[in-house]
Image (cartoon, helix red, strand yellow):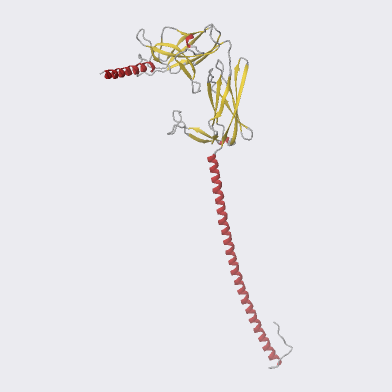
Amino acid sequence: MSSRNNRFRLIRWAVVSITLCSLTLTPIAPALGAASPINVLLIPNKKEYYANPGDQIRGILKVRNDSETDLTHIRAFAKDFTANDQETGDPKILDSSVGYAYLLAPWLEFSRDPVTVPAENSVDIEYVIHVPSDATPGGHYAILYISQDSPGEGQSAVGFLSQVGSLILVTVSGDVQVQGQIVEFFTGKKLYEYLPVDFYVRMQNTGNVHYRPSGTIFITDWLDRQVGTVEANESAGVVMPGSIRKYQSFWSEAFMVNEYRLDQDGNYVRDDKGNKITDLKVNWKQINLFRFGLHHAKVILAFDTPEGEKVVEAVTTFWVIPWRLILLIIAIIFIIGYGIRRWNKWYSRRLIKRYEKMKKIEQVQKKEEHKQWEKRKTKRKAKKSRIRERVQSWLKKVRGGDKKDKDLRWEE
């Protein structure tokens, strides 16, 4: 009996836990109903301040309601954040500020009364940042969200309404240390068949305040000729203190480029394994930009420090070999060469046959001419023989009968 009661208590506890989690984590608005979609925008999406210990900073958070229903009982609140572990620069929300050296949320104060944001309209929510007199120098970071209170009095907020918060970055004066270095500079692959080439720069912040590096990637070919440049950190993303951020850049200036296939909504088309599908595009206007061989890339980044601008750099190498195109060209050359060789053999045999045929014709003609010459020779001999006989017969008649003329000779 006791085991059955324990099992019942366990099931009841699981149901209650799931219900509480769904009420806490789901961004819902009870007053609106499920049929009304909520579309809230916070302006600005990021704000930076510079302050001294003991200062008070006043600001305004604009809440814009693009839905068709009024939003009631709206409050603003703040959460501390740091860089995420994926090195993408997206904020990682901290539920507790205990032990966090760059806290800012406890310094923020909002108006206590909730506000109503009319449909397709906006409302300003004022906030004050109270910088403590003993605030540690360097960066302090928080993100602003809005929530909706329960319609009942004395009930707490039931969920987040804004999917994207507004970042607040505060730099407190004092011993501000802006330090950083390039941990790694590499490409997505060492061997590319076609461009684009994806470059990655892992930048580490070893100081106590964020900074925003900017620079250029210079690309040279195997003849040490500069063939391209790519801007690094084009989005001007910051590196949070005590973190590493990875910046990605693409080099796509070439005659033949692999472009990602997009659907009608502008999303990447993927295969069954989840890989992005690419299509080979040929830009005939850039036919002189045929990429081949070993390439060198050098990234130069710079960021501002209290001592002046600091420059860091790193190098890497990669290959561009369109091996399928090369194999196709080799196959075409082989086929053309084999065809030319076969054609030469066929043409040579044809010439030989024609020559042999002409030789046979000439031999036949010579035989025929020789026969004609023999015939003419025979006729001449017969004719000479008849003439000789006639002359001899005539001489006999002239000289009287059978008297022979010993001096008469006939020479053929």
Question: What residue do we see at 67% from left, 85% from top?
Answer: 388
- 410, 392: nearer the viewer: 410
Question: What residue do we see at 55% from left, 43% from top?
Answer: 329
Q: Where residue 336 sits in the image (x, y, percent)? A: 55, 48
Identity of the residue furthest to the left in this view: 1
Quarter assignment of residue 263: top left
Label count reads: 0
Q: Where residue 195 sits in the image (x, y, percent)? A: 54, 33
For the N terminus, which image quadrant?
Answer: top left
- Is 287 located above or below residue 110 in the figure? below
- Is 407 located above or below residue 298 in the figure? below
- Is 388 located above or below residue 359 in the figure? below
- Is 105 located above or below residue 370 in the figure? above
Question: What residue do we see at 65% from left, 79% from top?
Answer: 380
Identity of the residue furthest to the right in this view: 407
Q: Where residue 54 sits in the image (x, y, percent)? A: 54, 6
Q: Where residue 88 sits in the image (x, y, percent)? A: 50, 23
For the C terminus, which image quadrant?
Answer: bottom right
Identity of the residue furthest to the front in this view: 2
- 57, 136: nearer the viewer: 136
Quarter assignment of residue 370: bottom right
Quarter assignment of residue 264: top left
Asked if one can make out residue 399 in the rendered structure from this viewpoint, the answer is: yes
- 229, 91: nearer the viewer: 91
Asked if one can make out residue 68 in the rendered structure from this viewpoint, the answer is: no
